[in-house]
Amino acid sequence: MTFKPLILLKTLASSLVWGTGQFLNKQWLKGLFFFSFFAVLIGIEWGTGSYGEPISLYDQMAGNPITVETSKGYVNDYYYNLLDGKYEETRLLEYVAELNGLTYNAELNVFADDSGNPVQPESNQIQFNENDLYTFLAAEMTRIDALEDFSTNGFEPLLEYDSFEAFQATLIGGLGGRDNYTTDDYNKMLVQILFRYDTDLFDRYADLFTNRFHENGGFFVKGVWGVITLGVTPSRTVTEHYDLSFFIPDGFSRRGVELQGNFSQQLLLRGIISNLLLIYFVGIYIWNVRDAYKTSVLIQANQSVRSEKKYFQDVYENAFEYIVLMPALFVITFVSVMPILFGMLVAFTNFDAQHIPPNNLFTWVGFENFRVIFSLSEQGGLPFGSQFFRVFSWTLIWAFASTFTVFFGGFVQAVVLSNKRIVFRKAWRSLLILPWAIPALISQMIFNVMFRDRGWVNSVLERVGVYDRLFEWGMLGRSYQEAGTGLQRLLYFGEDNIQWITNEANPWFVRIFIITLNIWLGFPFFMALMTGVMTSIDRSLYEAAEIDGANGFQQFRFITMPLVLFATSPLLIMTFAQNFNNFGVIYFITQGGPGGDFTTAFAGQTDILISWIYKLTTDANVRWYSMASVFSLLIFLIIGTLSAWNFTRTRAFKEET
Amino acid sequence: MAWLAWTVLILIVLFTHQSLTHQIAEKYGHKGIRIGFIGLIPIFGLVYYMKIKPPLRPSNPGKVKSVFNLKNILGTALLYTELIILGVIVLVPVVYVIGTSLNPNSGIPTSIWPSEPSFKAFQFLFEGSAMYGSSEETNEFISWYINTLQVAVLTMVFSVLFVTGTAYVFARYKFKGKKVGLLTILVLQMFPSFLGLIAIFTLFQTFGLLDQPLALVIIYTAGAIPFNVWLIKGYLQGVPKELDESAKIDGANKLQIFFRIIVPLSVPIISFVAVTQFMAPWLDYILPSFVIESEEKWTLAVGIFRFINDQSRINYPAFSAAAILVAVPITVLYVVFQRYLIEGITAGANKG
């Protein structure tokens, strides 16, 4: 007990710098093991960050700066123009001389050094970089009374300023002229001059665009900052330099210079990744501290400590499961869990068409999106609330109806197939199982083609005279308004053609059609499954029933049906869940239509939740990610709960407990 | 269309005859597939078993006669009517798509079989371009096929690698967090994949993986883990534990047990996982349509759908031809392995 402080010290050492506690325990290998993780953690943060480096606002602008050669050439040009008597003002040359510790004699037009030796303007003793140039031009501008004059009075009267004229001439003809610079470069140059002149403006932009966390932060620091703030600065386009556009040589034009803002979605994503990775490190950290503590206690108590080799062997033996699971766990964490987490979090933001980074950042809005839905309100002019309940009810109807029809369709067909009178049962079964074997995606696309307004099915129906009957009965040939009331409207097929998948006036026609079509796609699975169950029913049951005098129907009613339904009913919930999210049938056959523009928040008449989500997410004209995420979350709550409940009742799960 | 009605009628009569023949032959004690074929020969089949072929066992004449009572004949005919009509309904889209693929014009065909069938659509797919009317159309079918094949093979390999080891651990060992892990895996597969779509897009964007088909492998592999771990785990629990234990006594460690005993014993289920994983990329549309931009990098599902959905490249015969080329191998696999596949699917729901 007296040595307790030492234990505490070692534990503390490990909790600050991983592995040091182990070093103090003289366990070098183990210490190195933990320390290497610490080094990796710090290394990632340091390597991905840019700590200590200055942040330059200009780095975030498009365009290259004017080069040193151009700046220097500008001085030379100016010098010789002065010699030729084109210019009169000598301020630039005086400025250059001062910068380089020389003197400039205005009367003789020469540079001279300390000892009075003349210096040629081209010589290395005269240096003039682009920053000096910007500073000089900015200083020159202070000589003009008001900057606004540039824009209001035009630049013509101001051209008497030699320096601007000379500068333009240099850019056009001289060193590093027109060919080397683009419009972006010139505009960036103007911004640099402007910012040196108007330092307040510079400070305002610098405040926004030189965020320490965003620019310097490494993987983890920036990650945590990103999740909390989702970015702070949207993109901005600098246009204040338009006043200076007379600088730009002819043939180029002024253009806004973009300062790129934060990408909220990337910050959120990186934040999630780094936080997930941090969890792994925290796990190792806890292990490290606990180990330092436990070993110190053992050493204090003079008990034998396992050798390090033995320790790692034991770790391998005991953690074998975890080591094998590690790769899968890793992949699942970052490819499955991470996107799901991201999606869930987006549900609590306003990531929609009006908030697309980097021009408009999105932020946390709490339960606002859920409030919109459950209070039946609108968002951004789109009636999400009312449409959600419409789509949701149809999704439920669809899921129930399609599961029910497919299940019993399969059952009936299995009963037919198992009839003793059928010869070549396997061949028939193989034929009828085709819709299941043909990839659903393909058959759904085929249906889409077959049932178009001017598709094959309609042309056949027209040829065999079905159309004539339908015209006679008024199911075709009239507009919906003229179609009468009640049942007549319900049986409204279309105007010129049977609109299997496009009947906007009578969407229930399309909906019922889709449910019917789905039987084709779905019955074979249950048929095959149930014929399997039927052949496995114990024959002696039927024999016993026969002896008791049961007829065929009674045998079916009291033996076959209960056994088959009992064996297959667990699949009902699975099928329900699948149909609830049966994207393919809806999307490939009807594309969610008919209908589906902004008046219905882009939800078509046959859209189920999942296909609506797809539209909200992928359609470049819609992009309402926040709502799509809210719906996904709701789907998950429904389907996930249902499946988990269903699963906990299975034998497999009970065996685990 | 009248021909179709006649065909159906003839088929009903033919198969009813076959069934009656079969019933008679069974009453006389004959067995086997031969009866079925002979029964398909009109009249002769019935006569053959009633008069020509000697009965293998004497049968009560009343029982034989009962085959010919009206109720039985009508019942049989009714059964076959149902089967044949359903068969026609099942086959119509298949015949339609074959007919369409042989159509020389790119428009939507109005007859089920073209008047001048040609293999132009297939040629168009394999050669990459063809003249339709006065304009030349192009496609990248071969690239789509290669892309998909690459993705499929890699997905198969990685899925099997990841899934088998994970399932082994879950099936054989007890450890902290096992139950939580299993439930998490189960819950994960319930999430609609769209929930992750924006994230996956952003993820790919951040790491420069957009527009690269091979990046899909990562997503498919991860997506395969939950369901297939359950599947293999269920299978492995049926493998007797005594095998592991005796190997352990012989001095094998956990890895050796896995490679020498578990893997060889679970070849059937591993091949099942491999086959289903191989097939998945051929049929997935959502993900590749979202993350792959350039035409030559699409996978087949994306390319095929554009043939009927993208106004600028509408080409119904090409769609059908491509659909056939994709669907035939998969359909054959499904029909041949239907029993295993259905067992595999139900395993998730019943046994876990």
Image (cartoon, coloured by chain):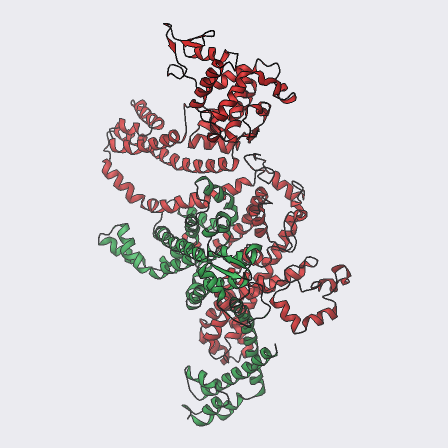
Colour used to depict chain B in the structure image: green
In terms of depth relative to the viewer, which is nearer, A546 or B17?
A: B17
Chain coloured red in this rendering? A
Q: Residue at x 57, y 41 (%)?
A: A626
Q: If the image is split into quadrants, where does the N terminus of chain A sit?
A: top left
Q: Specify the quadrant of the image occupied by residue A326.
A: top left
| Total residue callouts | 0
In terms of depth relative to the viewer, which is nearer, A227 or A475?
A: A475
Residue A280 percent across, percent down from the top left: 39, 37
Quick check: B42 above or below A311? below
Quick check: A143 above or below A377? above
**Can residue B224 be seen at all in this image of the molecule?**
yes
Quick check: A370 above or below A515? above
In this rendering, would A237 be left or right of A544? Answer: right
Residue A11 percent across, percent down from the top left: 33, 27
Residue B127 percent across, percent down from the top left: 44, 60
Residue A216 percent across, percent down from the top left: 44, 27
In this rendering, would A650 be left or right of B238? Answer: right
Residue lying furthest front in this view? A84
In terms of depth relative to the viewer, which is nearer, A256 or A175?
A: A175
Residue lying furthest bottom in this view? B51
In this rendering, would A467 be left or right of B265? Answer: right
**Can residue A657 be seen at all in this image of the molecule?**
no
Q: Specify the quadrant of the image occupied by residue A34.
A: top left
In terms of depth relative to the viewer, which is nearer, A62 or A654?
A: A62
